[in-house]
Amino acid sequence: MISLTQYKGGDVIIREHDVGETAYVIAQGKVEVSKERGGQNVHLAYLGAGETFGEMSMIDEKPRSATVTAVTETLVSEIRRDDFF
């Protein structure tokens, strides 16, 4: 089952190193992907509508490789591992 979740700008959607079992597809809005390096957050990318994130942790059951934060009000579809497989 796919669910829709809305996030406000500044909300952390996934956090680097957390265990993840959900992938996300951005329906509307914008998110920032970042990693921690030497105690600093390093910007990697901005993602927008139609783009996905979180899929690798959902598939390989390893910790999240980056943090994803909503930049604007963002609506995402969430796909859980059990539903995906």
Image (tube, rainbow, N blue to C red):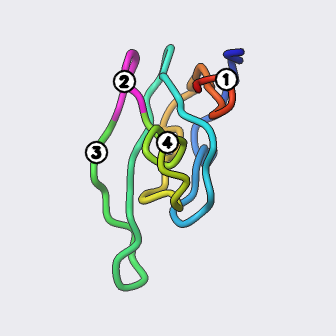
Residue nearest the observer in this picture, 2 or 67: 2
Sequence-wise, the earlier of marks 4 and 1 is 4
Q: Amino acid at mark 1?
A: Asp
Compared across the picture, whether 68 is left or right of 32 comes to right
Q: Does the CB distance between marks 3 and 1 fall below 8 Å?
A: no
Query: Of tags 4 and 3, which is closer to the observer?
Result: 4
Q: Which quadrant is the C terminus positioned in?
A: top right
Residue 59, numbered label: 4
Q: What residue does disc 3 label? A: 45
Q: Label 4 to label 1, Cα distance in Å?
A: 12 Å
Q: Secondary structure at mark 1?
A: helix
Q: Position of residue 28 (x, y in %)?
A: 49, 16
Residue 42 image-quadrant placement: bottom left
On the image, the x and y values in percent for residue 36 come to 41, 72
Secondary structure under tag 4 reads helix
Numbered badge on residue 83: 1
Q: Which residues are magenta?
A: 47-52
Q: Percent from the top left, x then y, of residue 72? A: 51, 31
**Position in image of residue 80 (x %, y %):** 66, 31
| Residue 15 among those drawn in magenta | no
Instruction: Name the disc covering residue 66, or none.
Output: none
